Each structure stands twice: as structure tokens, then as C-alpha cells.
Image (tube, helix red, strand yellow):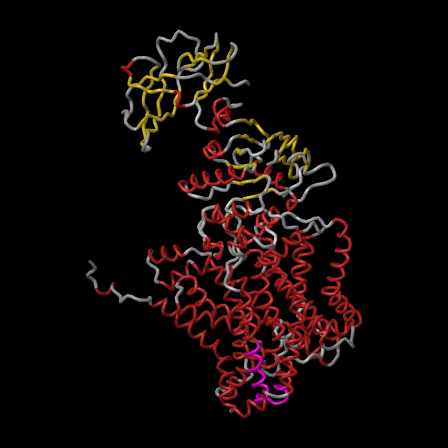
């Protein structure tokens, strides 16, 4: 188990900075997900940690030992860092057993270790004789994981390993990988552009954009208190409103919402699940009109248009807006019908 | 329901399709002529003649020579091709683009011009080692091209993963990179091997006896004697052995990339202090492949002065060469088109069989094709003996695979939907193909026809054996002057052949860059 520290890490290709001034600490045994849109530098960061590229600036320290300094640079094969690339990248000229045993020394016990790893990733023993192209995508990913686990790495890097799998398989694989790595206590970094995957897989989340680390923390903290509107939207659907804050209340077009912030004009965020829709006649809340509804099985994806409130005497900066909300599947609402919107919980205030 | 009976046609291939199939079958039958000839020779000569002619010292010597030549030149070519391709594609070698062109450029110099250059630089340099050296210099590009292309296409993620699994870079190269090059090495190695077996001029000048030189000698001594024919039979067996060896070594494993993620270019290794020594070695190597021919030709041109430029003779040779090359290329391309279309649009078991016979004939040395056509002409159709149609037919058979490969690729790029739409708009099948696929495939077809034409322009063996009296191509003129040791008079012809072959280098390089791995 080793703590991984990145300090002021930077890398650019030509004049294009891929990673800029990244400081990040990943505690020993933690699972961290690095998320960001494509081109945000998350894969570049992973390649720096793996040692496939040398950083231009900054340091990478694993278990107290620097992996690079001004003069030296530990090559990938001396780092004891496991790597599972997208699509697995199994060696097509080797059998599954030879793939898994690739990183193991030719010593007695090698075969037993390969068998153990196959079992660990839930593949039958006789798969060892097969060739990579005879396996499905999910099976290939399992082999890639087993291959990387074989050397008991100090850190495991996962580069969007689930993105090529179909939805159902993806969740199962994610749970399996999380439990295997958790049992082995290996510090893990997952790179993904899928926020749902990141939120459910990781103990810790780091959000990157344009080569910079925007925010890091627990998934819950980042979901509730994102650093900026872009991060808020990246981690889930968000309703972002301008508000006038007075006495711990943000006055928005949806009515007053409690906030933890000083007075002034602010940008606040609500998550859609904080908004409750009810038929208009039930009373409380502000008025809105249903624009359309589309059925999603467990819920209705509902587009509502918030209407200007005639009786509003409060200092509101916006007067009308359209939101997309989800309502339980029992609640079918006709387009054009009026509903009331009620806000629960408190709003997050962006610091900028 | 259709009521008009004229609209109905019994199911099965359309008339256009049947016509193409018939045409392809005819070409395939023609392709089988050389093989039929060898079998017929073996049967016709009788067992005793075969034993007497084949199981003798001369044949054993030729077999040993061929084995030594292949056994030495091929491994050297394989190692050099991998080393040069790795330097260009995977290191920070300065001027990589220039080097990669320089490594392909020897293709512009016909093999017998390479050995002409060497035998005038070092007149006493003969025998096995001379043959090996000149073969390696002349044929290395055939291996370098596919190896470099494959190396460029390899997904670097495999090598990175191997590194992350604890293998040092040198181990990664041998355990991951090299196995991925297997198909390119096998294919390129086969091509070089077949060229070595077929080459005539190179080995005459280095005074190294091979089957090809022995067959041509025999043939020129006794036209159509059983000795030459039976030697031809043994040579065919050697070629087939090489083909089988390649199939065995190639294996049936898949080497395509697993998955489809975007491939990044691989990280280049730093040469560091090695850069200068490597550069010096490469300069030395290019000095051997290009410098020696260039210097020799330059020297002879200067020594010969204006006297060697007999424009009447040169002009005649150039004109004849161009005519033969153009008509040969046209015939070959037309002959290959039905097969190419069928193999893309109507794949079937019959089509595979026909296509195989189109391809195998390209593996046969020119001497075999020539021997077969000579024998058939002499025995059955006397007027065709030493006639232009026979010569063109020989060219067609020799270069059929070249045309087929290019045509297939360009037809595959023309969407079949266009043919269907054209049919839907009322064009009968052949016209539909003519108006859509043929038009779209035209640039690719032109490129492959050019490759065939360039091959014909430098063809020596078959031309020497089959050309009508009075034919004087550039290669023939060059060869007769060189045989008289009149190196200066041969020089202008060599220069013209090199100039004609320059487009070949460009075309082959572009093709290797563009074609995906098997």
C-alpha cells in the first residue's frame, strides 16, 4: 500500500499544455476517479504516472520515493504500477495464460498464480489456453485486469476500462473490479469521462478541465458543492440560478431557498431531485406549466416552464425558465397543465 | 404479380455476371498453363529421362546454391529491414523522412543494374558473397516497406502495457514488438525469396549459378531441350516449397489490433550518444545501395562522353520499351478486372479457386512462364513462337497478381450501392458496372497498371527468351552491351531504366503506407 503524491505536475506537447500545475494526493489504498471531458488532460496525467511520458515540471512521489527528479526518471518497467488500458490491449500473439503470466518471472508457482488470477477475475481455468480474439470484450477486460494484478502493483491505473462494454456489463465489471482491488488494498486511479461511473466507483473524485485540476474530494462533497457551474453540470444535471442572498436565504425565481453564504448577488445551484412537482391545486410552491413529458420506465422525463409569479414581491433576478425534471412514473401530466414546484433542502452558492 | 413473361428470367447469375465469370475462368486457365507445362514435361519425358536429368550433380549444386543464397540473403534482409524500420519509425533519428525514402529508393535501380555497378567497381568480386551482397542491397526495400508500414500501425499501447508489466525496453521489443511484425516479415521475406529464385541478370554478372541462370543457359544452347524444361520443373518445386514454408511460418493467428481505440503514434526512443555512429552507419549503407550505382553510372557516362548516346538506337529501344510496357499493362489490367470485380462483389468458392490460380502464377519465375509459352508455341501454334502476342501474354501472366491487388483495392472502395442504383435506373448489369464502379476504380486501376508497366519495362529474362527477332528494349540493349563488357555503352540504358522506375518507388511507398495490415 503506497500513497501517491503529485506535486505541481506539468506536461505540454509542443506549445499545447496537456497537464498544468496538478497537485493531488491519493492516500494509500484509496480509489480515486479522475473525471473530465475528453481533451481535459486526464489520460495524459495517467500516462505521466505510469511513466509512459516524462513530465516537464513537478514531481511524482510513490510511497515516499520520488519517481522523477531533475535528472532522473524511473522507466515504466521499474515503477511497480499496474496499467489497464482501454479495450484491454491483450497481446494478440499470446494465449490468455501467457498474457496473464507476462509480467511474472519464469519460476515454479507461476502457473498456480495464473490459475489463481483467472479464478479471481471470474474466468474458468480452461480459458488460459484460449486466444484474445476468442474472448468477448468483457472477458478481455477481465484478463487485462488479471494481467496487471499479477505483479501485485503498488498502484493500479485504469484508463476508461469499461467504456467499450455495454451498459449492464459495465456496472457488473465496475463492481467486480472495485471489490478485487479493494480486497487487495491496491491504490487505484480510474480515468473516465462517465460521471456516473466515477461517482459510484471512487472514494475520491478529481475533476480536470483544460489540463488543470479543478476540484478534488469525496464524490458526495463534489456533487453537492461543486467549484463552478461547469463542474456542477459535469457531475449531474444542475439547475443554476441567479439569486439575491439576504439573511441566509437566496431569493430565486423558485422562491426563497436556504443557503450558507453572505449577502449579495450570487449564482446558486439546485439539483433537479430537490424540486418537487405537484398538481397546481395542492397549493404550496411556485407555478409552472408542463411543456412535454417523455416516458423512461421508472420515471417521466418532464420539461416544465416556470411561469412569472404575479404576486412575487421578492427581489428576483430571473423571471422565467425551463427545467428538465424527473417525476415518478405514476405521475403522468398533460402538456399545458399547471403544476406547482416546491424546493427542498438548501442551495449551493458558487464562490465566484 | 408479374404478368409479362419477358420480364421474368430464371434465377441465377445475370448474363453480365456470367460473362465476367467466363472471362475470369479463361484467364485462370491461361494462368494454369505454366503448371500444366511442368506436369506435361514430367510425364512426357518419361521416368528414366527425369531421373537422369534431375538426379545429377548439376541439379544438386544448383539446389545447394539456392539454399545458400536464400539462407544467407534472407536472414540478413530480415534483420536489416527490422533495424532500419525501427530506426525510422521508433527512434528520434534525424531526417527520418529522408532516410525512409532513401531506403526505398534502391527499387528504382533494377537488380541487374545493381550488379552491373558492382562488377564494374570490383571486377573480381564474384561468387556467393557477391551474390548475397548485391541481392541484399537490391531487394531489401521489398521487406523494408511492409515492416516499416506495420511498425507504424502497431498500437503503442501493447508496448506500454508490456513496460508497465516490468519488461525492460529491449525485452519488450523481442516479446511484443517483433511478434507483431510476423506477417510483414513473412510476406516480405517470401517476396524477396521468390525474386532471388527468379532473378537472372544479377547472378550472371556476379557469376553465381542459380536455376534461373542455368535454365537460360540451357535454353540458349539448345532451344526447348528437355534439360532446361526439367530444371524448370525443379525450380517450380523449389518455389512451391518456399510458398509452403511461408504459409507454415505465417500461422493462422490474428495479429490485427484488439479493439478500435484511437491509436497514438508510438513514443520514440532517444538515440542519445548513439545518434552519430548510427548516422555514419546509415550513410555507409546508403553509399552501398545508391552511391555505388550512382557513382558507376556517373563514371561511365563521363568516360563514354557523347559517343555512347547513340540517339537512334536509344530512341528505338525507348519507344519499343514504352509500347510493350503500355500494351502489356493494358492487357494485364483488362485480364485482371473480371476477377477483381468478382472477388469483391460475388465472393464464392469458385471465385476463390479462380483467384488462387491468378495469384500463384505471379510466384513463378519469368523463365518458367517463358519456357512454358515457348514450348506450347513450338509444339502447337508455330506462328506464335517469338511473336509479340506471346510476349504480351507472358507479361500478363507474370504481372497478373500486381494488377489484381491494386484493382481489388480500388473496386472495394467503390460502394456496391452505386451499381444497384444504376441498375435501378435502368442500366443493364455490365453497363451499370461500367458507369459506376469502373469509373470510380479508374484512378486505382491506373496506378496498378502503372506498376505493371514499370515491371514490364525492366523485365529481362522473359523478354530475352520470348521477344521476336529485332526486338530491342532498354533492358535487352543494356544486357547485350554489359555481356560484351562494354559498360560505357550500357550506361545510358541503365540511366533511362532508373528514370522510368522512379515513379515505381513513389507508387510502392504510397501503397505500403495506405494498405492496412492483413
- Quarter-of-image position of residue B465: bottom right
Seen at 55% across and 92% down, the residue is: B49
Q: Residue B98: within the magenta?
A: no
Please provide percent x and percent y for residue B470.
62, 82
What's the magenta bit mostly, secondary-structure-wise?
A: helix
Residue at the image position 54 percent from the left and 93 percent from the top: B48
Residue A152: quadrant of the picture:
top right
Question: Could you tell me residue B504's position as x and y percent?
Answer: 61, 63
Q: Nearer the viewer, residue B366 or A147?
A: A147
Closer to the camera in the image, B359 or B375? B359
- Residue beneath the point at 52% across and 64% down: B251
What residue is shown at x 51% (from left), y 54% (from top)?
A96
Name the quarter where the N terminus of chain A is drawn.
top right
Q: Is residue B219 magenta?
A: yes
Residue reaching furthest right?
Answer: B303
Q: Pick the residue in front: A136 or A333.
A: A136
- Compared with A42, A268 (above or below) is above
Q: Residue furthest bottom?
A: B48
Q: Is residue B103 shown left or right of residue A317?
A: right
Residue B351 screen position, x and y as percent? 41, 68
Q: Is residue B176 visible?
A: no
Q: Can see residue B227? A: yes
Residue B436, given in percent of the width and then of the height, sits at 42, 58
The C terminus of chain A: image quadrant: top right
Residues shaded magenta: B218-238
Between residues A227 and A16, which one lies in front from this camera angle?
Answer: A227
Please tell me whether residue A123 is drawn above or below residue A293 in the rendered image.
below
Amino acid at each position: 500500500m503506497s500513497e501517491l503524491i503529485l506535486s505541481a505536475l506539468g506536461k505540454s506537447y509542443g506549445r499545447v499544455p496537456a497537464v498544468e500545475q496538478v497537485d493531488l494526493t491519493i492516500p494509500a489504498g484509496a480509489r480515486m476517479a479522475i473525471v473530465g471531458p475528453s481533451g481535459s488532460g486526464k489520460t495524459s496525467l495517467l500516462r505521466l504516472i505510469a511513466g509512459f511520458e516524462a513530465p516537464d515540471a513537478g514531481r511524482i512521489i510513490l510511497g515516499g520515493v520520488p519517481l522523477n527528479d531533475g535528472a532522473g526518471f524511473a522507466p515504466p518497467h521499474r515503477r511497480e504500477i499496474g496499467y489497464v488500458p482501454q479495450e484491454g490491449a491483450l497481446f494478440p500473439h499470446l494465449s490468455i495464460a501467457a498474457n496473464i503470466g507476462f509480467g511474472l518471472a519464469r519460476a515454479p508457482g507461476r502457473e498456480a498464480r495464473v490459475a489463481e488470477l483467472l479464478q479471481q477475475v471470474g474466468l474458468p481455468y480452461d480459458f488460459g489456453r484460449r486466444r484474445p480474439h476468442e474472448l468477448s470484450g468483457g472477458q478481455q477486460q477481465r484478463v487485462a485486469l488479471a494481467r496487471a494484478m499479477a505483479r501485485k502493483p503498488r498502484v493500479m491505473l485504469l484508463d476508461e476500462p469499461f467504456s467499450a462494454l455495454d451498459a449492464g456489463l459495465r456496472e457488473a465489471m465496475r463492481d467486480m473490479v472495485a471489490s478485487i482491488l479493494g480486497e487487495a488494498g491496491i491504490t487505484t486511479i480510474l480515468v473516465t469521462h462517465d460521471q456516473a461511473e466515477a461517482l459510484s466507483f471512487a472514494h475520491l473524485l478529481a475533476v480536470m478541465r483544460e489540463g488543470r485540476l479543478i476540484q478534488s474530494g469525496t464524490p458526495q462533497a463534489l456533487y453537492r458543492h461543486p467549484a463552478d457551474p461547469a463542474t456542477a453540470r459535469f457531475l449531474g444535471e444542475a439547475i443554476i440560478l441567479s439569486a439575491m442572498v439576504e439573511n441566509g436565504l437566496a431569493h430565486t425565481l423558485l422562491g426563497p431557498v436556504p443557503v450558507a453564504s453572505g449577502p449579495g448577488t450570487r449564482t446558486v445551484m439546485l439539483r433537479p431531485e430537490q424540486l418537487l412537482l405537484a398538481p397546481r391545486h395542492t397549493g404550496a410552491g411556485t407555478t409552472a406549466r408542463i411543456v412535454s413529458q417523455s416516458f423512461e420506465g421508472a420515471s417521466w422525463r418532464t420539461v416544465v416552464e416556470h411561469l412569472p409569479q404575479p404576486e412575487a414581491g421578492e427581489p428576483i433576478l430571473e423571471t422565467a425558465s425551463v427545467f428538465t425534471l424527473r417525476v415518478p412514473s405514476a405521475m403522468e401530466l398533460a402538456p399545458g397543465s399547471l403544476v406547482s414546484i416546491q424546493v427542498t433542502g438548501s442551495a449551493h452558492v458558487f464562490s465566484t | 404479380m408479374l404478368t409479362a413473361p419477358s420480364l421474368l428470367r430464371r434465377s441465377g447469375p445475370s448474363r453480365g455476371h456470367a460473362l465476367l465469370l467466363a472471362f475470369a475462368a479463361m484467364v485462370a486457365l491461361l494462368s494454369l498453363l505454366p503448371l500444366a507445362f511442368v506436369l506435361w514435361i514430367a510425364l512426357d519425358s518419361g521416368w528414366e529421362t527425369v531421373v537422369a536429368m534431375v538426379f545429377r550433380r548439376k541439379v544438386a549444386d544448383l539446389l545447394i546454391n539456392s539454399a545458400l543464397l536464400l539462407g544467407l540473403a534472407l536472414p540478413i534482409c530480415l534483420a536489416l529491414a527490422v533495424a532500419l524500420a525501427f530506426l525510422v519509425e521508433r527512434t528520434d533519428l534525424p531526417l527520418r523522412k529522408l532516410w525512409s525514402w532513401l531506403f526505398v529508393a534502391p527499387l528504382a535501380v533494377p537488380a541487374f543494374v545493381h550488379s552491373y555497378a558492382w562488377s564494374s567497381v570490383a571486377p573480381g568480386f564474384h561468387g556467393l558473397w557477391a551474390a548475397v551482397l548485391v541481392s541484399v542491397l537490391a531487394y531489401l526495400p521489398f521487406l523494408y516497406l511492409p515492416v516499416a508500414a506495420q511498425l507504424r500501425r502497431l498500437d503503442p499501447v501493447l508496448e506500454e502495457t508490456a513496460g508497465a508489466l516490468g519488461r525492460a525496453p529491449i525485452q519488450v521489443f523481442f516479446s511484443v514488438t517483433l511478434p507483431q511484425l510476423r506477417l510483414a516479415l513473412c510476406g516480405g521475406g517470401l517476396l524477396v525469396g521468390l525474386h532471388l529464385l527468379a532473378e537472372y541478370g544479377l547472378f550472371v554478372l556476379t557469376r553465381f549459378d542459380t536455376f534461373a541462370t542455368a535454365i537460360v543457359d540451357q535454353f540458349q544452347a539448345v532451344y526447348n531441350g528437355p534439360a532446361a524444361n526439367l530444371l524448370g520443373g525443379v525450380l517450380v518445386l523449389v518455389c512451391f516449397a518456399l510458398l509452403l514454408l511461408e504459409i507454415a511460418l505465417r500461422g493462422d493467428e490474428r495479429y490485427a489490433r484488439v479493439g478500435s481505440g484511437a491509436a497514438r503514434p508510438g513514443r520514440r526512443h532517444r538515440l542519445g550518444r548513439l545518434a552519430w555512429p548510427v548516422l555514419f552507419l546509415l550513410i555507409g549503407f546508403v553509399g552501398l545501395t545508391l552511391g555505388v550505382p550512382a557513382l558507376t553510372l556517373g563514371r561511365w557516362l563521363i568516360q563514354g562522353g557523347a559517343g555512347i548516346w547513340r540517339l537512334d538506337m536509344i530512341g528505338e529501344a525507348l519507344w519499343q520499351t514504352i509500347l510493350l510496357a503500355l500494351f502489356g499493362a493494358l492487357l494485364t489490367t483488362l485480364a485482371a478486372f473480371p476477377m477483381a470485380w468478382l472477388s469483391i462483389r460475388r465472393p464464392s468458392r469458385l471465385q476463390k479457386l479462380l483467384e488462387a490460380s491468378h495469384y500463384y502464377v505471379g510466384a513463378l519465375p519469368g523463365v518458367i512462364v517463358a519456357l512454358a509459352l515457348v514450348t506450347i508455341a513450338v509444339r502447337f501454334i508455330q506462328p506464335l513462337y517469338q511473336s509479340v502476342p506471346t510476349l504480351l501474354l507472358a507479361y500478363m501472366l507474370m504481372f497478373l497478381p500486381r494488377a489484381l491487388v491494386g484493382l481489388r483495392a480500388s473496386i472495394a472502395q467503390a460502394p456496391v450501392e452505386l451499381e444497384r442504383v444504376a441498375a435501378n435506373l435502368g442500366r443493364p448489369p455490365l453497363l451499370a458496372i461500367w458507369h459506376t464502379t469502373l469509373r470510380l476504380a479508374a484512378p486505382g486501376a491506373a496506378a496498378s497498371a502503372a506498376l505493371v508497366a514499370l515491371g514490364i519495362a525492366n523485365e529481362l529474362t522473359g523478354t530475352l527468351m520470348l521477344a521476336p527477332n529485332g526486338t530491342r528494349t532498354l533492358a535487352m540493349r543494356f544486357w547485350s552491351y554489359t555481356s560484351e563488357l562494354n559498360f560505357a555503352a550500357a550506361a545510358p540504358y541503365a540511366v533511362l531504366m532508373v528514370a522510368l522506375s522512379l515513379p515505381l518507388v513513389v507508387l510502392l511507398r504510397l501503397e505500403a503506407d495506405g494498405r492496412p495490415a492483413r
